[in-house]
Every structure is written in structure tokens, then in C-alpha cells.
Amino acid sequence: MTAELVRGQNHPLPETRLEIRVSAGHPVLAGAALGDEQGRVAGAEWIAHPGAASLPGVDVPGGAAADHRLAVDLDALPGAVHRVSVLLALTGGAVRFGALAAPFVAVAGPDGTEIASYTITGLDTESALVALELYRRQGAWKVRAMGQGYAGGLAALLADQGLERPADLAAAILATASPAPVPTGPVPTRPAPADLSSAASPAAVSPAASPRVPEPEPVRHTAPPTAPDPAPAPTPATGTTVGGPIDYSHPRRRTAPADPAPAPEPRQAPPVPVAGDATGWSMDERLYNQVWGMFEDLARTAAAYRSACDFAESRLDRELDEVLTDYRARAGGANDAARAAARARRDELVERARAVLDRDLAQLAAESEVVEPALPVAYARWDSPVWHAYRVPAEEPMAVRLGDLHLPERTDLRIPMLVRLPLERGLWVDSGRGHSEAAGFLDEAELRRLALDCAVAHAARLLAAYPAGDFTVHLIDPAGAGATALAPLVETGAAAPPARGAAGVSAVLEQLTERVDLLQMALRGGAADALPPGLDTARQLLIVHDFPHGFDDRAVTRLRYLADEGPSVGVHLLMVAAREDAAAYGPLLDPLWRSLLRLTPVPDDHLADPWVGHAWSYEPPLLPPGSGILRQVLGQVAAARHGKQL
């Protein structure tokens, strides 16, 4: 059965030799771009177009036409190619796809059976588009419905592919797609076979030579010649065979019997997931890229499912409206039958979309079961065995895990939330209720305790991710309400005792503000070697608890300054606060909250994905009950730092 794709949906490719069929209803240029795993095209030589119609593994048509056939051999592609993008561009005077019929593309196997199809709808001012994308993941190829249009034409499309001088390249490609001029002179006749001995004589091929009637071309048999059967004798009156219908076949021409259809190749089984099956210089980088790829795949497959369901519902509403407006069908039960048929079509489309979603989710779940145990310390959950073998690293990792993400389509499929290091913005653990259902079941004191516990766990991960002495933690707890939760940091020596009262708050903020000022002046003036000799060059993390208690207006201003300017010079904030507690400041603190990455101590669906419109559910990284791994790790961090200082 052909999979009818919607924008963003993918489908596995069981074959490696494919034919891509394009039907646009208007002359278009068809081409293909070969990209790496990130989709970047190395240069113009990796674009297949009418002027360069053949690349390794790809053949495109040599001109503009309303219908095209592109041949793709995935096994023949270079090893560096992970994506093949099918490109379409208007020619022949058309200026936008929105004024034409929706283009249709299909992917077929070597036997002509269609594997997937996609009707590109929703186009308006676009005159060039990426129709499909064939991409490789874990050694298996898939097709994704793109439908990405460009109002700027082929030049804008090529620029988005990362090519240099896209306008010149687009003009050259479009020029090659122009139809060849029709010859106006007399049509030459095919010359008769000449004697080989006179082939070198100019007179033998001179245009002035007398024309000769070409000899008939001998019949070319596609099968071994056999003795002809005697033709039946025609009757003199009718010229037909006796007792039978007229036979219009040539009595001595035999066509070869049709070759039997090749047996379909067996469907390939889903690829076995492998940890680290992504590009990268190190295993940590490959695992990071693989986790990011899992996040993208989950986002796309959920978006495709939701889009298919929305389309099914909108089509059902449209069909029901048409039934209601047809007064002729109101009698005799025709309305009821039409409504039932419309709902059946809706249910069928939703079931097919759900089957595709379940297949993709099962594959991602299998990959997660393989990847999760292979994650290093910085990416691993707190209950992973790798923490028991923790050693202070010699260099900082690419990222650190701050929780898990999942979607409602499958809540048990969790993707690690990896945040790149160094942090580009501060963190905010929201101790307020917000709109979370889980927070509504907890009292205020319990919610604040969980928020500070999460902040300590985040700080411990950051301390464990950096080499000895490269990360320092400062604590602000004006009223001392968080002494119990902060004890692991203080008692192990990983952090100094927290600042108390308004004076302590002011002293810590003044110290860090001066540090930011010094580093910014040194960097802007190109005098990084002129810093004071006693200045700590390690990155700084300031944990602020019970905000705004103990903060005056000057302290609040300094806190905002650290949030805005600190990350660029290695000073980061980790706020543990409820926004409603600072409501007295009004909109003054709105820029502060917006500058921080909001995390929650309980599951909450507050993280928005603008690319596909999802609201991801966030789950904080909780320590196993009764586990001593936090103090063990912090103790090793403190011991390594003190040993380095000695």
C-alpha cells in the first residue's frame, strides 16, 4: 500500500534503487542536492540539474517538463552523503506555485510499485521548493515529505542549502533548463549504409551527392530466430483465415515472450539500533548528536500524526457540510449513508496515521533502550551505574543533562534534555505552582523544598562536568531556610557556606559584579593577560534561594546585570524562586525571568517547540530515594579541587 505522506512525515524505504516521479502540471526544473548529515551541500558540484544531470547515485532529467522521472541508487551514493533533497523550480514564465495545481511527487521501487507519495499543498508565492528528502539514519534510508517553498526562487533555495553565490548558480541552472531550439532547415534523411572501403572518401558523405533511397532496416529480433510457422491460406474472397477472426499480426515476425515480473525483494527488517551511530569526532559527540537526532525524529513523527488527524477532521467537516447542503440527498437515507462514509474515511486515515506513529515510536523506544545505558556521566540519569565509577574529568563535555522530555503520544519514551556547555543563559527553578497539575497536589513548603533539591542536583552535575578547579559555586540564602537542602554542597566542601542577611547578599553580588566588569574590560581592550593575579579564572555559578528576601533595589539591579552580562564572561545564575513572590516589583523583573531557562521541580509541559508547535513535558532529574551518590560525587569534586590547590 502506498503511504500518503503529509508535510513533515517520514516513511522507511525498503528499496535502495528508486524512481522519483514528479507531476507538476506546468514545466518545472527538477534537480537533486546531495548533503551531509546536517543537510549542508559541499558545493555546486553536488547539485544534479539539467546542466549536470548525473552524479554518483543520482540521475535527473535534462530539461524542464511538467512530468519528470528521477533515478536514485542509494547504494551508489558517496559515503559522505546522508541526505538527498529533491528540488523543483518553476520555468516557462510561471511566477508562483500558488497559481498552479498542487505538485505531486511519488517514490517508487525498481518494479514500479509506489512506496510513498506526497501532494504539496499550501503553496502561494513560492517559485522553488524542496519537495522530498531522502535521509539516512542508523544505516537505513527514509523519505520525508518536506514541501519547503521559497518565495525568493531557486536562488533563495540554494542559499538556504549553504551554497556560495546562489544567484549566479541559480541563473546558470535555469539557463540549462531552457528548451532546445527547434531546427528550421530541412530534416536530413538517414544515409544508406555505405561501403567501408569508401568511408574515407569526402564525396561519399558530401551534401551535394545525389540522394539515394534508404534501404529498409532489417528487423531486429529480441529472441533467438525460430523457423516461421506456415501462414494459414487466405480464402480468395475475404482474405481471412478459415473459421477464425482476422489476424493482423505479421506472419513472419515473432516478438519475444514477455519477461516474467521479477519477484519482489523481501522487505528489510528495521535496523538494529546502535549507540553512537551518528557523526562526531568522539563518542561523546556522537552520542550527543544521536540524542539530538532522536529528539528531532520524535518531534517530526508526532507533528506528522497530529497534522494527519487535523486533516482528517477538517476533511470530515467539509464533507459533512457538503452533505447537509445537498437537499436532494435528504430523503431516502442518503444523508445518513454519506455521513457514515465520511466518518469511515476519517477513521481510516487516522488509523493509518496512528500505525505509522506507533511504528516510529517503537523504533525510537528501541533506540532509547540502547542509547541510555551507553551515555557518559554528563548525559546519564542519576540512577545510572556510571556515576558509581565517576572520576573528575580532564576536560569539560559538550553538554550536561538537566532533565528529560516527552510528548503525550508516548509518555514512557523520554529524550534526555541536554544543554550545551558553557551555559549561554542562566537557570531558574520555579518554586511556584504555575499551571502544573503535579504542583497543585503539593503544599507550598513541599514545593519549595523540591525546587531547592533540584537546584542542588543541577549544581552537582555542573560541578561534576568540569575539571578540578574550573567551576566555583556561590550560595545566597538570606534567611537560612535552605540549610538542609544546601548541606551536601557545604559539608563536602564543594561550595562555601551561604551568604546570610542583606549584608551577605550585597557582598556576594558586589564581588561577582566587579568580576564581570574586569573581565569585560579586559576582553574588549584585548588585555586578557593584564587581569589581577589573584583573580579566580574558573567559571562561577551563583545559587540564589528565597528571592527577593534580603534584596534591596541595588541588589536587584546587580542581579539583573549578572543575568544579562554574566554568561559572556563565565558568571551564571541559578535562581530558586517563585515569580509571584516578586510581584511587588511589577514588570521591572520581567526581563530577568525571560533571560533565564525555566525548569520545574515537578513534571510540567511548559517547554515550547516553535518549529513544530509542540509543548514538551519536562521532568526534573531526581535522585533515587536514599541514594548517597550525590555526596559521593561532590566529595570527589571537592577533594580534586583541594588537591589541585595544594
Image: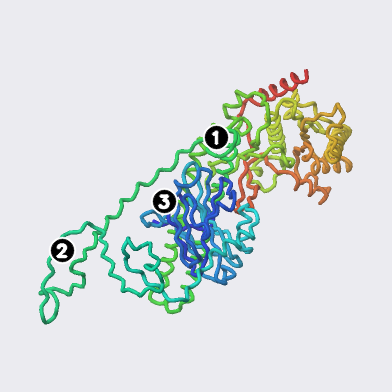
Q: Position of residue 73 (x, y in %)?
A: 44, 50
Nearer the observer, 451 or 80 = 80
Q: Which mark is residue 228?
A: 2
Q: Which mark is residue 17?
A: 3
Sequence-wise, the earlier of marks 1 and 2 is: 2
Quick check: 337 left or right of 255?
right
Between marks 2 and 3 in the image, the one whose residue lies nearer the viewer: 2
Residue at disc 3, secondary structure: strand
Nearer the observer, 366 or 116 = 116
Residue at 74%, 42% (x, y): give it: 425
Sequence-wise, the earlier of marks 1 and 3 is: 3
Nearer the observer, 590 or 80 = 80
Q: Does the CB distance between marks 1 and 2 fall below 8 Å?
A: no
Between marks 1 and 3 in the image, the one whose residue lies nearer the viewer: 3
Nearer the observer, 237 or 634 = 237
Amino acid type assigned to the residue bearing label 3 in the image: Arg
Residue at disc 1, secondary structure: helix
Sequence-wise, the earlier of marks 2 and 3 is: 3
As measured in the structure, the alpha-carbon distance from the residue carrying label 1 to the one carrying label 2 is 72 Å
Q: Residues within 10 Å of mark 3 (few under 14, many from 20)?
A: some
Residue designated by label 1: 372
Q: Is residue 305 visible?
A: no
Quick check: 241 left or right of 363?
left
